[in-house]
Image (cartoon, rainbow, N blue to C red):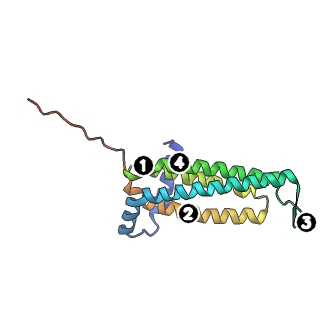
């Protein structure tokens, strides 16, 4: 991992050291079963991504027509090129998140640190997405509410992720067969 990301990880670990911890039985259960929880999340995210593509095509259709009719009445489109750009940015972030999360499933199943690190990278990508989507909102009130709600969501996910950190250690140790001496 990059040394800057490791510094961020260590800083967050220090900040979260003083907060109350979840029960050990619960964290152990979550750490053991995290791989299939993440798998379900990836599957649901793919369905959500497909819905986002459908919405993006609808936005492009409205942008192309300019106006549309609903039961004979002309309705002007509230979509703009800006909303299409914001949708494309959302889709790109979601694709990156889905790919990294899917890559984490196998290491999480083996309780490897790599799986946890990939989920940490996903959290950092979500931080960038919250900031960029708040900027792309184009409204001061939406900017503030997006930042606040995003910060709360990221704080909760960081807390849960760091509660599980101790269960994911090192690299896989391959079993080596030592031939018997004759």
Is 169 left, or right, of 153 in this rendering?
left
Given this view, does label 1 or label 3 mark the residue nearer the observer?
3
Residue at the disc numbered 1: 106
Residue at the disc numbered 3: 72
In the picture, the disc for residue 157 is none
Residue at the disc numbered 4: 100
Q: Which element type, helix, strand or loop, lies under badge 3?
A: loop
Examine the image and state in which quarter residue 167 appears: bottom left
Is 147 left, or right, of 115 in this rendering?
right
Given this view, does label 3 or label 2 mark the residue nearer the observer?
3
Location of the C terminus by quadrant is: top left
Residue 160 place in picture, x, y as percent: 48, 63
For the residues marked 3 and 2, what is the alpha-carbon distance in whole angstroms? 49 Å
Say which label, 2 or 4, has the lower sequence index: 4
Front-most of 58 and 127?
Answer: 58
* Furthest-top residue in this view: 182
Q: Residues within 10 Å of mark 3 (few under 14, many from 20)?
A: few
Discs 2, 4 touching: Cβ within 8 Å: no
Say which label, 3 or 4, has the lower sequence index: 3
For the residues marked 4 and 1, what is the alpha-carbon distance in whole angstroms? 11 Å
Say which label, 3 or 2, has the lower sequence index: 3
Examine the image and state in which quarter residue 144 appears: bottom right
Q: Is residue 8 visible?
A: no
Examine the image and state in which quarter residue 149 appears: bottom right
For the residues marked 2 and 4, what is the alpha-carbon distance in whole angstroms? 20 Å
Q: Which element type, helix, strand or loop, lies under badge 1?
A: helix
Discs 4, 1 touching: Cβ within 8 Å: no
For the residues marked 2 and 1, what is the alpha-carbon distance in whole angstroms? 25 Å
Say which label, 1 or 3, has the lower sequence index: 3
Q: Which element type, helix, strand or loop, lies under badge 4?
A: helix
Is 65 left, or right, of 151 in this rendering?
right
In the picture, the disc for residue 155 is 2
């Amino acid at each position: 991992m990059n040394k800057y990301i490791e510094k961020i990880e260590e800083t967050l670990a220090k900040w979260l050291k003083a907060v109350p911890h979840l029960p050990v039985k619960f964290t152990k259960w979550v750490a053991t079963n995290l791989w299939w929880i993440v798998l379900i999340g990836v599957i649901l995210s793919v369905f959500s991504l497909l819905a986002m593509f459908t919405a993006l095509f609808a936005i492009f259709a409205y942008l192309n027509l300019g106006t549309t009719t609903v039961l004979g009445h002309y309705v002007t489109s509230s979509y703009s090129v800006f909303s299409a750009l914001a949708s494309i940015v959302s889709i790109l972030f979601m694709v990156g998140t889905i790919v990294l999360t899917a890559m984490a499933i196998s290491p999480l199943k083996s309780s490897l640190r790599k799986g946890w690190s990939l989920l940490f990278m996903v959290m950092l990508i979500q931080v960038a997405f919250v900031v960029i989507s708040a900027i792309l909102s184009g409204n001061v009130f939406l900017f503030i509410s997006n930042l606040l709600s995003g910060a709360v969501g990221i704080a909760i996910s960081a807390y849960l992720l760091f509660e599980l950190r101790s269960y994911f250690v090192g690299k896989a140790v391959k079993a080596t067969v030592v031939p018997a001496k004759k």
